[in-house]
Amino acid sequence: MSRSSPGTSTLESNNTRKEHTLKPALKSTLVLVLLAVCGAVAWAAGANPVVGVTGGQIAGRLIPPGGAAFKGIPYAQPPLGTLRWHDPVRVSPWKGVRDAGSFGASCTQQISTWNSQEAQGNQEDCLYLNVWTSEWPAKSPKPVMLWLHGGGNTGGAASVDYFDGTSLSRRGVVLVTINYRLGLFGFFAHPGLTAESPHHSSGNYGLLDQIAALQWVDANIAKFGGDAKNVTVFGQSAGAVDTGYLLASPLSKGLVHRAIQESGPPIRGAAPLAQAEQLGSNFAAAMKAPAGGIDAVKFLRSLPAAELQKAAVAARGESGPPMGPLLDGHVLPASAALIFATGHQLPVPLIIGNNAREQGGPNSQEALKKAIAGNFGADASKAEEFYGVANGGNGKDDPLYGPAAIQFSADTRYRCGAVAEAIWHSDRKLPVYEYQFDPAIAGRPATQHSAELPFVFGNLLPGGFLGGPFGEAHRKISNDIQEYWTNFAKNGDPNGGSLPAWPKFDAAARAYLEFTDNGPVAKEGLRRAICDLYIDALKQDLASR
């Protein structure tokens, strides 16, 4: 799979002709031959669907039995030179027809085990998106689904095999996947950057990329048969967190009409701008940048991306540079928790949920108790009893949710924050549908973080980080979740057809749909006891600010 940035090429014939003196019969024969050749050339050129978009024309690829895919479409200028740590800028026009048959490069990131495929060939020139449609030429407008990949806002890309949009687009939607700036290049804050910004802010360039991609969709997606007034943003992990931030941002108004958050509520974690600026200044000093805001920024922009990336990874931690979304006063005027709690988020239908076990957790009883104290405040002792670590206890195991440390991590990082967001959103009388995904990937002991991705996209592939083997039961689960997701994109309601009913969420019953090995089951009150403690602590934290 290509990772190079798409180039441009003009689709034209390079044939040259020589004039000859021919007899009339030969001339007639030659005319027939030339007509046949010209017809073949026209057919070959037409085999690649061509569309005019912002910047110029692009040539995608047909996908049997009647669809098309367009990959590596630039939606902003490459963020190089003075555009490093700058709002995305409208793409420059190109001449001829640009090839859109392969993915653009992934954004600068550290290569690890989990992202070894997509991180190869990563670079700063990475602001590309991809479009799939099952109907070409495009006819009636279809709902649009725009995917935000996960990866902690420090890794990942739209080019992962699991995110191929062929299967999902065949459910009657136009699918868009995007790259956005990551880590140091996507979320670096510094006083010099704030000073040069017309918004008097810095950081959140990755979120601004996502908004720029939505603006591109608004302006161009009708060319692909998409309905710009019916756009569902959906994402997983950091992509789900960012989806929540987009709902909290006034800059997304009119661009997002529905949202799906898979394992990622944006309830905690965004630093204030002043704190992020200080961390940015510390990083600049460590890089031997000159004193002074503007001079420091100029120096940092002159350094190679690889050098900055290496230094940022080495400095990661509480004292490292900003590597994720922050409260900049422009993209995010306040914390997402406060915005949702006070009802100032976008008023759109929402699906939100998590996987049974997710990932990680404190690696000792001492660390677990310390983390419980940090998350549950005055109710820490009650939380210790719930997890079975009070009075020297070794923790309670659960057959579905796992050991106490795994339960704690899933509850506090994903599950209970999602419940809080669902309560606040439904309090505005907005449609909310909560879920939990239980089925484990074949050969894995439990449902881990990201396990739902092959099912959502219908790409049940062998091998790899999320690979099978998969069987008929897995394909049934995939069919159900794809049907729910695309029903929601079409109507704002996941229900329809022969699917089991998925009840709306409200604060009293807290209905949710549990995806099990035997099919979806409607239930109520997901982990209510521990989530009540978590939400009480969250409310106390908000009240103290």
Image: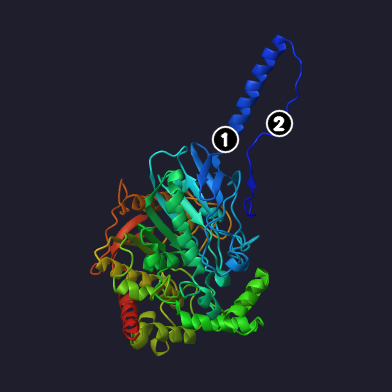
Residue 223 location in percent, x, y? 45, 44
Residue 170 location in percent, x, y? 44, 44
- Residue 392's quadrant in the figure? bottom left
Q: Which residue is mark 1?
A: 47
Point out the frontmost of discs 2 and 1. Answer: 2
Task: Measure how far apart labels 2 and 1 are at the Cα level.
Answer: 19 Å
Residue 127 location in percent, x, y? 55, 59
Q: Is residue 356 visible?
A: no
Which quarter shows the C terminus?
A: bottom left
Query: Residue 15 bears which disc, if any?
Result: 2
Relative depth, front residue between 350 and 405:
350
Residue 144 location in percent, x, y? 41, 50
Q: Is residue 14 above or below residue 294?
A: above
- Hey, what amino acid is under mark 2? Asn
Relative depth, front residue between 458 and 1:
1
Mark 1 is surrounded, within 10 Å at the Cα level, by few (under 14), some (14 to 19) or many (20 or more) other residues, namely: few
Q: Is residue 72 above or below residue 313?
A: above
Q: Is residue 417 visible?
A: yes
Please report whichever mark, 2 or 1, sits nearer to the chain's N-terminal start.
Answer: 2
Horizontal side of residue 475 vs 31, given as left or right: left
Mark 2 vs 1: CB contact within 8 A: no
- Hey, what amino acid is under mark 1? Ala
- Residue 183's quadrant in the figure? bottom right
